[in-house]
Amino acid sequence: HVRTFTNGTQRYIVTEMYGPGGCYIVDFTGGQVPPQYQTNSGFQASLNVNGVVGSQYAPAITNLGIGMPGNLNMLSFNAGQAWDIGAGAAPLIPASAGALTSSDGQIVNLDLADPTLSLWFNFLQGPGYPAAPIVSLPFSFAAATSISAQMVVVSPSNASGIALSQAVRLIVQ
């Protein structure tokens, strides 16, 4: 019998055998749980809603009441580089559920099969990132909604050529 236990960032796999004398542990292995969510890429690509920041194991989820003000905050020192934001209605996907992972380990936590998924600039076809590294866009919603979003900025210093922000989930109810 094999059991898997997860304790925070550690995962343990225990192989047990049952016999006349009870249960015997035959094998016990442990190790790091791989990251599940992309975190902000420092000064290359950062995104948050009202300052909420997730971790490698917990998504950045912001809850707001209908009509309440919020701020979409972006940061990148890659001024002039192509950038984009993908947004859709589907919940965020962890790596263990099939999220796309780049060659350099960055994670796209948006559901790429979401029919509502759209890109602000038709996948990096818009203007370069502004000269001001911090951009804050105020918003409010008059009706209940849920939106997931993630930012990408071209970053020649990364092996994949891009930097991803954390994915954010906004729930308005």
Image (tube, rainbow, N blue to C red):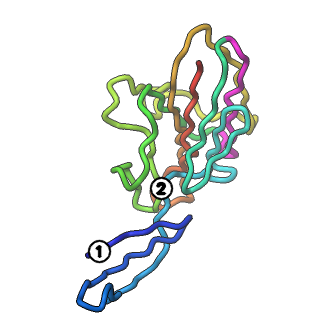
Depth-wise, is mark 1 or mark 2 nearer the camera?
1
Residue at the spot 36% in from the left edge and 79% down from the top edge: 14
| Front-most of residues 108 and 30 | 30
Residue at the spot 55% in from the left edge and 14% down from the top edge: 144
- Determine which residue is flagged by label 1: 2
Placement of the C terminus among the 4 image quadrants: top right
Image coords of residue 93 (percent x, y) = 42, 44
Q: Amino acid at mark 1?
A: Val
| In this picture, residue 156 sits left or right of residue 24 | right
Residue situated furthest front in the rendering: 20
Image coords of residue 22 (percent x, y) = 31, 86
Write the start and end of the magenta stretch as one range.
67-79
Image coords of residue 151 (percent x, y) = 55, 38
User: In this orientation, does residue 92 appear?
Assistant: yes
Give whichever of discs 1 and 2 has the lower sequence position.
1
Secondary structure state at the residue bearing disc 2: loop
Q: Are marks 1 and 2 in contact (CB under 8 Å)?
A: no
Residue situated furthest top in the rendering: 142
Residue at the spot 56% in from the left edge and 45% down from the top edge: 59
